Image (tube, rainbow, N blue to C red):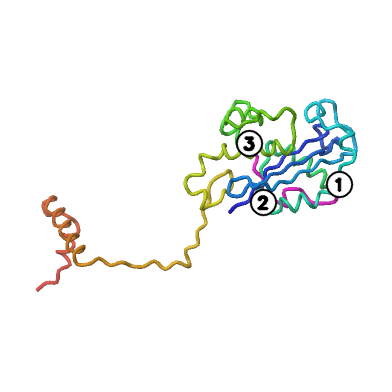
Amino acid sequence: MSRQIVLDTETTGLSAENGDRIIEIGCVELIGRKLTGHNLHFYINPERDSHEDALRVHGLTTEFLSDKPKFAEVADDILTYVRDTEVIIHNAQFDLGFLNKELERLGLPAFETFTAGIIDTLVMAKALYPGKRNSLDALCDRLGVDNSGRTLHGALLDAELLADVYINLTRGQEALLIDLGQVGEEGTVVEHVDLSGYQLPVLTANEQEQAAHRAMLDDLDKASGGKTLWRQLAEKEKPVA
């Protein structure tokens, strides 16, 4: 079954290029579009203060984060967890900008290179609901996902909410094959069934079934006034005496 990771981050501010850092990362695992409970969650010491506006959003103080591991200490765990999987992010450009800046500081390649691909639920939502608000809260309200516990932004909680949102966003595409197949690009179902090991039996019709078939053909020929194509061809193919 296909494995996907839903990821969210919290940061000290809005600009990775200007020195803002990741302070929390939360990931939840989906296998066969179901939450497994095998999650990954870290608070991270950013080695700097959060901007006041950001602090009001996430509530993670410098004092609280001061004894948490630095990104370099958890980078391997994060990359191992997401390796070769599809990663689902809301507004992926923002989170990837921060993740890639953190990896750049460690001399590592871009985050995307460790994954099997990135799915951006904001892009999906804008295509489905053009001109409407498509924040995570707005999508939760629209899709009936309970976000009543979201008083402050938290990476793990937001990843769990986003997983439910993603499943609802792609529900119309899963059809009845979802348990047999796997979700590919943009949520479409790709079914892989190897039939090379199957040898299908050939069942021949018995005499009774053949007689019933001939009778049905006779009835069709009679109803058409003797103009059925198979009878005309059969007459042409009869050997000349």
Q: Quadrant of residue 45?
A: top right
Per the rendered image, the range of residues in magenta is 106-123
Q: Secondary structure at mark 3?
A: helix
Amino acid on which the number 2 mark rests in the picture: Thr
Q: Position of residue 5 (x, y in %)?
A: 67, 46
Q: Which residue is mark 2?
A: 85
| Badge 3 or badge 2: first in the primary sequence | 2
| Badge 2 or badge 1: first in the primary sequence | 2
Q: Is residue 122 magenta?
A: yes
Disc 2 crowd rating (10 Å Cα; few below 14, some 14-19, many 20+) is: some
Q: Residue at x 9, y 74 (%)?
A: 241
User: Distance between the Cα atoms at labels 3 and 2?
Assistant: 19 Å
Camera-near label (2 vs 1) is: 2
Image quarter hosting the N terminus: bottom right
Marks 3 and 2: CB-CB under 8 Å?
A: no
Q: Which mark is residue 105?
A: 1
Amino acid on which the number 1 mark rests in the picture: Arg
Q: Which residue is mark 3?
A: 123
Disc 1 crowd rating (10 Å Cα; few below 14, some 14-19, many 20+) is: few
Q: Is residue 235 magenta?
A: no
Q: Position of residue 164 (x, y in %)?
A: 61, 38
Marks 2 and 1: CB-CB under 8 Å?
A: no
Q: Position of residue 212 (x, y in %)?
A: 18, 60
User: Distance between the Cα atoms at labels 1 and 3?
Assistant: 28 Å
